[in-house]
Amino acid sequence: MKLPYGSLQERRTTLTFLQPEDVQDESDDYEDDTGFASQRSLATSITHYRYENGRRYHAYREGQYWQPNDDKIKDQELLTHHLFLLSLHDKLTLAPLSNPRRVIDIGTGTGIWAQDFAEQFPDAEVIGTDLSPIQPDYSSPNLRFEIDDCCSTWTYPADHFDFIHIRCMYGSVEDWPAFYAACYEHLRPGAYIEQAEISVRLDSEDPTVIAPGSIYDAIFQVTSQVQEIGRRTFSIQERCRSLIEEAGFVDVVEKKIRWPVGGWMEDEANGGSKKGPIWRDFGRWNLQRWCEGLEGWDMALCTRVLGWSYEQVKAFNADVRTKLRAQADKEIFQNVSVVYARKPFPGELRPP
């Protein structure tokens, strides 16, 4: 499958919302110039996949990550990338970067953020790492992809990177302090880390909407059970700022955004304006993102961790979709945080 990346400049004219049906489906295998399926010859744990309950998952470090890596989830990642660009006013990053030379995108997924960044900074050497080999076989000359586990020992030199980018890694890291310590060690002094995370909890200013017994509370209870049993937090949006500060970073800045679910938010809300993101349409697309992405988010978690059957997960998801659509006028949102911070220089005083 090749996503219709184009260049970032080309996509800016149609950035408002890419129709999911515009994403073209292709076989996972591609042929080389000799006509042989070159990927087939790489019979290793890295290029093999695991198929489970109708979805495809990574086989390298099998079970370390809960989300599928099939075409459906690729479409979800493309939509999520566009929603981030819209809510950040077409910016790939908020950190005050100045001519970064070495950049790493951890958990790169399809690699779309890394591709856009490499295009925007052609003098930078950009690396995108992930457990799944689902990145395109074409990219900018200054970008390369590596199959790697960010929770293992890093093999890069200390004080190496000018920028470390992390996005949507909830439920992926068992030991966040150790992960941030690795980031700190491998950033050069004065360089930046940035993390963008979405809360998995649907929230509302009206406590009656998310009260116990509501579908929103049911989703939260399932996530809480998975988190408790699986030992990997899905609440990193709420904690990433404090954990980054505890790791020793300075000049920590957090931008908070509310992503509406459903078309209830006015355009002037959320710090936007008539020239900013169209929040009403944004909410409708985030609702579609939920309805179409739900199975990929919870199928492996509920069957592997909670012991649900395939049929139970399907029934739960059908109920969630029905109620989310029926209550699309309710003021439901997700909290989103973008946190960036700097590694101090040697001898620099850190805040108490």
Image (spheres, rainbow, N blue to C red):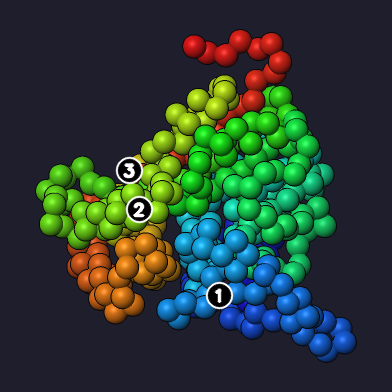
For image coordinates 55% across by 27% down, the residue present is 247
Amino acid found under the numbered disc labelled 2: Ile
> To which residue does mark 3 refer?
269
Q: Residue 194's spot in the image, x, y percent?
A: 57, 38
Q: Is residue 265 visible?
A: no
Residue at 82% x, 44% y: name it: 123
Q: Is residue 344 left or right of residue 269?
A: right
Tell me: 123 left or right of 325. Answer: right
Q: Which tag, 1 or 3, sits closer to the chain's start?
A: 1
Give the camera-side residue of 143 and 218: 218
Q: CA distance from mark 1 to mark 3?
A: 43 Å
* Residue pointed to by mark 1: 50
Q: Residue at x 69, y 59 (%)?
A: 147
Tally of marks: 3
- Circle 2 packing at 10 Å, graded few (<14), some (14-19), many (20+), is few
Residue ranking furthest to the bottom: 35
Find residue 49 and report its image quarter.
Answer: bottom right
Is 337 in front, or is 90?
A: 337
Q: Which mark is residue 229?
A: 2
Q: Is residue 351 above or below residue 3?
A: above
Q: Quadrant of residue 271?
A: top left
Q: Secondary structure at mark 3?
A: loop
Q: CA distance from mark 3 to mark 2?
A: 38 Å
Q: What secondary structure is marked by label 2?
A: helix
Residue 115 against residue 20 in the figure, above or below: above
Q: Amino acid at mark 1?
A: Arg
Q: At label 3, which amino acid type do we have?
A: Ala
| Residue 219 seen in the figure | yes
